[in-house]
Image: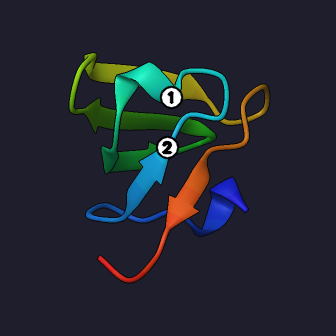
Amino acid sequence: MNALLEPGMMVRHPDRPDWGLGQVQSNIGGRITVNFEHAGKVVIDGRQIELLPIFGM
């Protein structure tokens, strides 16, 4: 599913709900940069963590 994430999409980190909603900034080669409400900009290794897309926002 991470391969389908595009800039502007909203996601949540499955293991860090305290980070709040995140907006995808980029998705290049499995490295996904996300700007989270309460954690700031974080680079996620998409091979290790499956982000949860949030639809309807």
Would you identify the image quadrant in which residue 51 lies?
top right
Q: Determine whether the residue tagged by mark 1 lies in a helix, strand or loop.
A: helix
Give the residue type that dot 2 points to.
Arg
Q: Is residue 23 left or right of residue 2?
A: left
Q: Position of residue 46 (x, y in %)?
A: 67, 36
Query: Would you call the spot at circle 1 few (<14 residues within 10 Å), some (14-19), or many (20 or more)?
Result: few
Secondary element at tag 2: strand
Query: Which comes before the other along the chain, label 1 or label 2?
Result: 2
Disc number at residue 25? none
Give the answer, above or below, for where 41 lies relative to 31: above
Q: On the picture, is 3 further left or further right than 41?
A: right
Q: Residues within 10 Å of mark 2 (few under 14, many from 20)?
A: many
Which scheme is used to colour this image of the protein?
Answer: rainbow
Q: Quadrant of the N terminus?
A: bottom right
Taking depth in this image into account, of 19 and 23 the one nearest to the observer is 19
Give residue 47's position: percent from left, percent from top: 78, 33
- Callout 1 touching callout 2 (CB < 8 Å): yes
Residue identified by numbered label 2:
12
Q: Which residue is mark 1?
A: 17
Q: Establish if 14 lies above or below 4.
A: above
